Image (cartoon, helix red, strand yellow):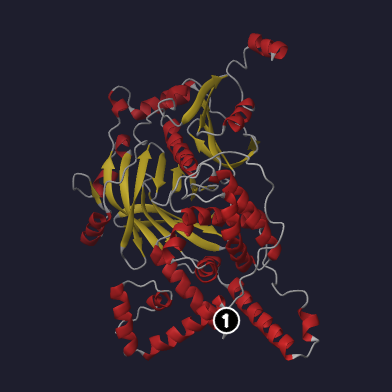
Amino acid sequence: MNDPSIPTWEDVARTHGRKIYNYAYRLTGNPHDAKDLVQEVLLRVRRGLDSYTPGSFDGWLWRITRNAFLDDVRKQKRRPTSPLPDDVDRLSGTSSPAADDVLASIRLGEDIQKALLDLPADFREAIVMCDIVGMSYEEIAQAIGSPIGTVRSRIHRGRKLLKERLG
Amino acid sequence: MSHRPELLSAMLDGELSDTEAVWVVHHLDGCGQCRRELDDLTSARAAVRSLPMLDLPDGIVPAAGVTHLWTRRAALATMSAAAVAVVAIGTLGMIGLVSDITTSVDVSEAEAILAATSSLGVASDGSPAAEHLTSGSSARYNARQTMACRDEDGSVGATVDVTRIGAVTVMADPLAELTVLNRGSVSTGPAEGPIETVRVTGPAPTVGEYSVTETRREEFRGRTTDVVTLGRDGYSRANLFIDAETGVIVYRELLDADGSATCVLELVEFEPIELPIQASIPFDIRAEVTEAVYEPVTGDMPDELAGIPLVATYPIDDGQVAVYGDGLFTVAVMRVGGGHPEAAAGDQSVSTVWESDGVSWAVVGSLPDDLMQQLMAALPKPGDANPFIEGWRLLFG
């Protein structure tokens, strides 16, 4: 159990929690679902970590994450909700240049998030893993259980659709 | 000049081989269309990457206290054991035949076979697999197969082992995805997560998130096949081509969200298995004897055992397999008509086998001790039907 190649649970929570949160948030557009997912994943990791056999830790973690996410989607059949923060209207009432910049970046972010949510789930997942989480194609292939060629093709077609939607 | 647009995205991500990179750079030099596409892809990629990385909200750490010890390896072993046990029980104890599923064809060999033939692949003696499929003997239906997993670009990425014994076919691919085909049902899923069972026939066409969106009969490479399309979330996800006469899966396509096939599995090696038991008792006669002597087991299993929810059930010849799993913990509970608890006893992964009131029970897979005790406590015990033992239990616990 003191194998240095096996991270402690606290390490996992600290280094991967934020990535898992962003992954879930970009897939669902919903901060509450994202938070729930991180908790569920950390719980599953905690159960499994003590007797985890050294190997590809990231692959193991992302398979757990993805399974937890899919379980959640199946259970809840949740519909994505708008990621727009509640206070945007209030922000738009101000006129300082800094606030306008903030507003513009939120609006832009909202458009991108909305376009992401419009993508077929398989494409969205591959793009979020690649561009938000920063995983390599090989890591994505391991996590989703598909060949690298599939990952390549999903990311490519997802980006094309995204470009069409963003104009 | 041919375009290979999917390489452009991979180039942006630094995911091209040297050869591909040279090809793309050369191609872009003379292709305005691909240069424009590269611009589009670059801006789409940049847009997603511009999204801010959000901070983890406070209060997200779960309460302390490890609930159970469990290993991924054990979870995988349990799922495999469950699949193996389905076969074991379904065929009355011919366990050793499937416990050592091995890859008999390597990827380059599979590529060569696929390049050389457009038929159903070859048997281990070099003859076309189709010849074996047309044999009238039921023993011929028991076979090891190897299927080659071809990617969209035509390259063979891996080979997949398929074992078929009696009515049950088990496919275990290199990524630990399991598919169990058992008469009218198809079960599939990752070894770590819940598996989905789909009833192909019968009054209730679907279980879980998958549904059968289409079935049709068509000629496929000289064989009559039943093509079953499985769908999920409104998309078609897979086409299974099942040989109509023998039930052998001869071809499988995995579909992407837009309906294109991302990966196909093709039969490249087919090795009929001669059952050792057949020398004394022909397979079909043994099945008749079984049906005549034992009542099939019916009735529902509990929705939950030891806090682990029921995720799938498989009907088998004279009973049922119930799989309990919560994503990390998986265990299979089997009930079959009494008289052959030895059906599973030869497999080390089978934790416990017993008989109670004319029903044989087996629990497959290991669990942490506390969970296993809870699970066993909820199931019928040997001798439950004996009034003396019942009275003894009532009085003395």
Is B178 or B307 nearer to us in this picture? Answer: B307
Task: Look at the picture and state if A10 lies above or below B378.
Answer: below
User: Residue B74: image x %, image y %?
Assistant: 48, 39
- Dividing the picture into quadrants, the one containing residue B80 is top left
Q: Secondary structure at mark 1?
A: helix
- Does the rendering let one see residue B169? yes
Residue B197 image point, x, y percent: 53, 46
Q: Residues within 10 Å of mark 1 (few under 14, many from 20)?
A: some
Q: How many marks?
A: 1
Identify the residue under disc 1: A165
Q: Is residue B233 left or right of residue B7?
A: right
Q: As drawn, is B373 to the left or to the right of B275?
A: right
Location of the C terminus of chain A by quadrant is bottom right
Write the residue at 56% across / 39% down.
B69
State the image quarter where residue B137 is shown.
Answer: top left
Residue A95 location (% of width, % of height): 78, 91
Residue at 30%, 22% in the rendered image = B280
Which residue occupies 28% across, 74% down?
A: B19
Amino acid type of the residue tagged 1 in the rendering: Arg
* The one of B51 and B366 positioned closer to us in this rendering: B51
Q: Residue at x 37, y 59 (%)?
A: B264
Q: Would you say residue B213 is visible in this rendering? A: no
